[in-house]
Amino acid sequence: MEESLQDAAEEIKRAEHLFYVSLKYTRTVDVIRSLLERLISTFDHGMLSLLKYAKEKKKISEIPSTPSSRCELLGNTFKDLEIQSYLDMYILFRKLIRFPYTKREEYRRHVTMISKLENRSFEVNIDILEEYYNKTMDFLRLVAGVVKPKK
């Protein structure tokens, strides 16, 4: 449980470097995609940590292997934490990585990845990435508060 939380902390450090250093100097969609993959990985480890905690507290019997079933189980198990918005964001990240995308204004401040998601266009730029990064940090703080509460 704490090992998964530590892994999530390591992933968010890598995401932070991508956001504040790599993206600053290499304004490309590849860096945007790498950052999204790191945020997904951070969520994966954080969700696994919560599920291990729930299993240890005997709230669940087993941890599912697929990300979608993990999201569903987390949403049902931790309803009191208002975790659903974070899970929705995680699902969005996974879709953004899987679906086809195009690039706009690469090598400039307004570099944008445009994905076609279910009959609509979804744009990810540096400002939106900052919001995603901050929400991922909030999720990690929430997980840490549940798994390692202050005594």
Image (cartoon, rainbow, N blue to C red):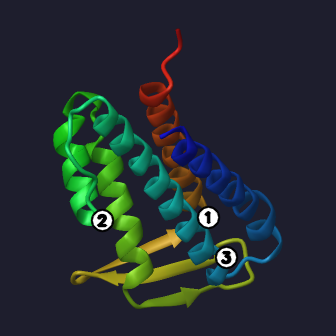
Q: Nearer the viewer, residue 63 or 39?
A: 63
Q: Position of residue 146 (x, y in %)?
A: 41, 27
Residue type of the residue flagged with mark 3: Val
Mark 3, other Cα within 10 Å: few <14 / some 14–19 / many ≥20: some
Residue 4 has which mark? Answer: none
Cα separation, mark 3 vs mark 2, equals 28 Å
Q: Earlier in the sequence, mark 3 or mark 2?
A: 3
Q: Nearer the viewer, residue 62 or 22?
A: 62
Find disc 1 in the rendering and name its residue: 126
Tell which tag, 3 or 2, sits nearer the viewer. Answer: 2
Cα separation, mark 1 vs mark 2, equals 32 Å
Tell which tag, 1 or 2, sits nearer the viewer. Answer: 2
Residue 65 has which mark? Answer: 2
Q: Give the left or right position of residue 112, taking residue 74 as reference.
A: right
Residue type of the residue flagged with mark 1: Ile
Q: Give the left or right position of residue 127, taking residue 123 as reference.
A: right
Q: Residue at x 38, y 59 (%)?
A: 90
Q: Earlier in the sequence, mark 1 or mark 3?
A: 3
Q: Secondary structure at mark 1?
A: helix
